[in-house]
Image (tube, rainbow, N blue to C red):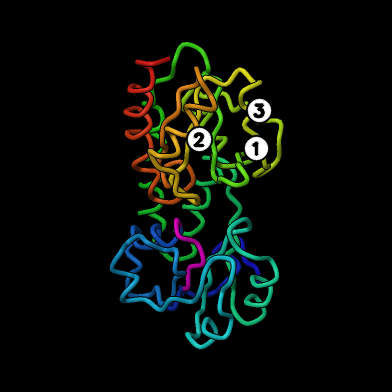
Amino acid sequence: MIIQSAKDISFTPSRIISLVPSQTELLHFLGLENVTVGITKFCVHPAEWRISKTIIGGTKNVHIEKVKSLQPDLIIANKEENVKQQVEALAQDCPVCLTDVNNLADALQMILDIGSLTNTYDKAQNLTKKISDDFSTISLHESAIPAAYLIWQNPYMTIGGDTFIHDMMSRCGLENIFADRKRYPEISIDEIKDSECRLLLLSTEPYPFNQTHIIELELLLPGIKIVLADGEIFSWYGSRLLYAPGYLNKLFNQIGLFL
């Protein structure tokens, strides 16, 4: 069954599988080392869990039988990260907490929900308070900076106005020039060139943009400042949010020298 809160189950889970990297890191932060038994191959934090936990496939290709063999009593999945059919198949045998995170408020509520489900609510509540307080310290520019954020190349793909990354951009004073699009649309260089874009962020994930791509795009987009952006900071919505305000302040203080 798909569950929404601790009220939906009558026990504290003792065998948890996480299908989402950012939520795996959250489980570690909440001290659930001994009860987390399975993670995906993309769950890179904490690094030691890749050795001590069973890898059950990727976020989009979960090995259903391997999950079942671990006999979990709670699976943590996400509406966007995981495949609906796979989640529904798993939910026939085990409670699945299916999160849906599209902005910071959703992320904070997700953390509280996971805390409630795993009997770590006090830790989760302290975490959300720390994140909220730190986000209030982000320094904003006097006016929003027209910007675009690329997540993929060949074809180029960006983020629409209904995504978590869009919300993160807006919280640090950036105006997403593709806010009228949905989810993760394909775009062209000409669309960026013909816009009022002043800043182009190249994410380090899921596509591994690097300095070489900056040099290539600077030739195609003269006059637009292009920088690498830590994809985990902009798109992970668990305990990694603790690092976001400091990173964003540092990044945009540097960028501000050029805009």
Q: Which residues are magenta?
A: 17-22
Side of 82 where 16 appears, left or right: left
| Front one among 76 and 254 | 254
Element type where label 1 sits in the image: loop
Element type where label 2 sits in the image: helix
Query: Which of label 2 and label 1 is nearer to you?
Result: 1
Q: Which residue is identified by label 2? A: 168
| Front one among 89 and 256 | 256
Q: Which residue is identified by label 1? A: 160
What label does residue 190 carry, if any? 3
Classify 233 as above or below 256: below
**Given the image, on which type of amino acid does mark 1 rest?**
Gly
To which quarter of the image does residue 161 belong? top right
What label does residue 112 carry, if any? none
Q: How many marks?
A: 3
Query: Which of label 3 and label 1 is nearer to you?
Result: 3
Query: What residue do we see at 48% from left, 52% from top?
Result: 112
**Magenta span has 116?**
no
**Given the image, on which type of amino acid does mark 2 rest?**
Met
Between marks 2 and 1, how big is the CA–CA gap?
12 Å
**First in residue order: circle 3 vs circle 2:** 2
Element type where label 3 sits in the image: helix
Query: What residue do we see at 52% from left, 40% from top?
Result: 104
**First in residue order: circle 2 vs circle 1:** 1
**Given the image, on which type of amino acid does mark 3 rest?**
Asp
Classify 108 as above or below 251: below
Side of 203 where 103 appears, left or right: right
**Magenta span has 18?**
yes
The x, y position of residue 129, in whole percent, is 39, 40
Query: What residue do we see at 62% from left, 66% from top?
Result: 3
Q: Residue furthest top?
A: 142
